[in-house]
Every structure is written in structure tokens, then in C-alpha cells.
């Protein structure tokens, strides 16, 4: 089967996640993504690159398409917290709209909790997940967020993620049962959640609209008896590995992608916050990840889409 997707990247590959500060200016960051050879990227936190108009201008100047944006929510928190997060989400939608919404994605995710961040790789029997009342509330909020994006002709995806309330197979299935949103399958986070990423792609192909290719060193996840005393930032930067160097069976995962029709395949290698001193090393690493994936997909019938 011929792969038609465009390979993109994401801000986490350049050390940007949440509200963590980096030394680079918006222009330096965008130029770094382009220098690594990417034609497309997800956006970072709202306002990271300036106003929606400034964001669109930076993307256009670097000839970068916008894949979408990752948007975490505390979905089960108080309504006042959700209402405040919706305001930030609306800003992200403004940015996607300014950049051109055709094919872009609002990639929703749960934010998790401090307890879950101290209990990585929990099981569905841990007693730490949502019960029916929480799921009722969360499903309604996810649908509300999805409808906001749909009203602007922006597609929606949901990203199951380690140390969150949508992490393992049971929780992914419950999400799909209770909502109409489709999935972002992240090869590393699905493995970390106790799933076989390739098997889940094959079984859920009709509900998948986005792909994150990530490799991971399972040995970097601290045991729960240790993690409870650590801040997640102390070990998160060591979790992702260069593509092909970690514990994900990427051969089988990439084979499974023949089952899905997605516009984007995004490479992620989460890193510690980017500095000016580390910029060259990060560009080289992300360029190597891109070349590795291009070679692997090329062997499976993929060729780079032509620029318009």
C-alpha cells in the first residue's frame, strides 16, 4: 500500500511541553524545525509563537504546514477550571484557523494528576481510574471541546498518554464507546500503557485519524516505589529514544499503518528544554529521526508529497 501522509514533527521534540520555558525566540524555534528538514509541525502551547496572525506568518515564512496542536485538559476538574482551560483552547483554535484549518487537528488529551504522575504504568486494576460518574462528566466535556473545533472546520483527535486517566486499553475503549472522537495513536505511549501499538492500530483502524511515531526506553520509567518521590520532569526527558533505538517494535507498527488513512505521521522524541547551546545537537537528532522514518516508510511504498 502506498503511504500518502506527510511526515511532521512536534514541539516536544525540541524540548517544548506545557509551560516550560526555552531560551529560543519563536523565529529560532521555527527555523530549527525547518533546518531539520521538516515540512510540517504541530504547534506548541497557545501564544508560544505570538498572536494567531504572528504564528501564521512565522509558519509561512519557514514554509511549514501546521499539522494541529496538542491540547491537554484537566477533564475531571471543577467546572470553573474547565471553563478557564476552554479559553486557552479557544486561543489554540484561533491559531489553527489563522494558519489555515484544512486538515489540521485539535489533539485533545487528559492532563492526568500528580498521583498518576507518581504512579507511571499503572494497570486498569489499580483503582486509580475514573468511575462511571467521572466518565459521564468527562465524555460530555470532550464532546463539547470537539464541537467547538468542528464549528471552525477543525478536526479533532484524542491522544491517550502515560500518567493520565486515558492511558490503558480499557480506558481507550471506554473513551471510544462514550464519545465520537477519533484517536491519535502514539507508538510509545500505547506501549507504555500496556498495549501492543500495532495490534491496536489494526483493531481500531476505523477510529484512528492521527499517528505519532515515537520510540521509548522502558528502563527509563522509574518503578512506582521510586517515582512517588520524584517530579516527572526528573525522568521524562530520558524516556524517549531515537527512532529504532528503543523498545517499541517499530517494524510491526509501521507495517500496521497500511490499515489507516491519515494525513500526517508525526515524529516525536521528547527532550529536556531546548537551549541555544543544545540547538545544533537537537537539529541533527531530529534530522536523523526524519531520515530514519523516510527510509522505513520508503521501503513500504511511501514517497514525499510534493509541495504545492
Image (spheres, rainbow, N blue to C red):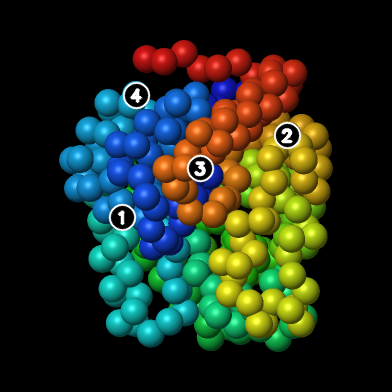
The residue labelled by disc 1 is 46
Q: Visible in this render: residue 206? A: no
Give how far apart the Cα atoms at labels 2 and 1 are.
31 Å
Residue 101: horizontal and vertical position, in percent? 32, 38
Residue at 54% from the left image edge and 38% from the top image edge: 282
Vertical placement of 198 versus 118: above or below?
above
Residue 147: horizontal and vertical position, in percent? 35, 58
Mark 1 vs 3, N-terminal side: 1
The residue labelled by disc 4 is 63
Give how far apart the Cα atoms at labels 2 and 4 are.
27 Å
Mark nearest the camera among 2 and 1 is 1
Residue 222: horizontal and vertical position, in percent? 74, 70
In depth, the one of 150 and 162 nearer the eye is 162
Looking at the rendering, in which quadrant would you find the N terminus?
Answer: top right
Mark 2 vs 1, N-terminal side: 1
In depth, the one of 249 and 261 nearer the eye is 249
Say if mark 2 contacts mark 1, CB within 8 Å: no
Give how far apart the Cα atoms at labels 1 and 4 are.
20 Å
The residue labelled by disc 2 is 254
The residue labelled by disc 3 is 278
Say if mark 1 contacts mark 4, CB within 8 Å: no
Q: What secondary structure is found at the residue carrying circle 1?
A: loop
In depth, the one of 178 and 217 nearer the eye is 217
Q: What secondary structure is found at the residue carrying circle 3?
A: loop
User: Does 49 sit left or right of 207 as displayed?
Assistant: left
Amino acid at each position: 500500500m502506498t503511504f500518502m501522509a506527510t511526515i511532521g514533527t512536534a514541539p516536544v521534540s525540541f524540548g517544548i511541553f506545557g509551560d516550560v520555558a526555552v531560551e529560543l525566540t519563536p523565529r529560532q524555534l521555527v527555523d530549527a524545525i525547518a533546518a531539520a528538514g521538516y515540512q510540517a509541525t504541530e504547534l506548541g502551547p497557545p501564544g508560544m509563537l505570538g498572536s494567531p496572525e504572528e504564528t501564521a506568518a512565522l509558519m509561512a515564512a519557514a514554509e511549514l504546514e501546521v499539522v494541529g496542536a496538542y491540547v491537554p485538559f484537566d477533564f475531571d476538574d471543577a467546572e470553573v477550571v474547565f471553563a478557564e482551560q476552554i479559553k486557552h483552547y479557544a486561543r489554540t483554535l484561533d491559531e489553527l484557523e489563522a494558519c489555515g484549518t484544512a486538515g489540521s487537528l485539535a489533539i485533545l488529551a487528559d492532563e492526568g494528576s500528580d498521583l498518576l504522575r507518581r504512579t507511571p504504568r499503572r494497570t486498569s486494576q489499580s483503582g486509580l481510574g475514573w468511575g462511571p460518574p467521572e466518565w459521564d462528566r468527562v465524555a460530555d466535556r470532550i464532546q463539547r471541546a470537539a464541537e467547538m473545533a468542528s464549528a471552525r472546520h477543525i478536526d479533532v483527535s484524542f491522544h491517550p498518554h502515560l500518567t493520565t486517566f486515558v492511558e490503558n486499553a480499557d480506558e481507550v475503549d471506554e473513551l471510544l464507546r462514550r464519545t465520537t472522537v477519533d484517536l491519535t495513536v502514539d507508538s510509545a505511549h500505547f506501549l507504555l500503557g500496556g498495549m501492543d501499538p500495532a495490534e491496536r492500530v489494526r483493531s481500531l483502524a476505523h477510529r484512528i485519524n492521527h499517528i505519532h511515531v515515537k520510540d521509548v526506553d522502558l528502563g527509563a520509567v522509574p518503578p512506582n516505589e521510586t517515582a512517588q518521590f520524584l517530579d516527572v520532569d526528573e525522568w521524562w526527558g530520558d524516556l524517549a529514544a531515537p527512532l529504532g533505538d528503543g523498545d517499541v517494535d517499530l517494524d510491526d507498527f509501521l507495517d500496521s499503518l497500511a490499515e489507516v488513512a491519515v494525513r500526517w505521521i508525526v515524529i516525536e522524541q521528547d527532550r529536556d528544554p531546548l537551549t541555544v547551546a543544545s540547538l545544533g545537537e537537537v537539529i541533527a537528532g531530529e534530522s536523523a529521526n526524519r531520515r530514519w522514518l523516510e527510509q522505513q516508510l520508503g521501503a513500504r511504498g511511501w514517497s514525499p508529497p510534493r509541495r504545492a
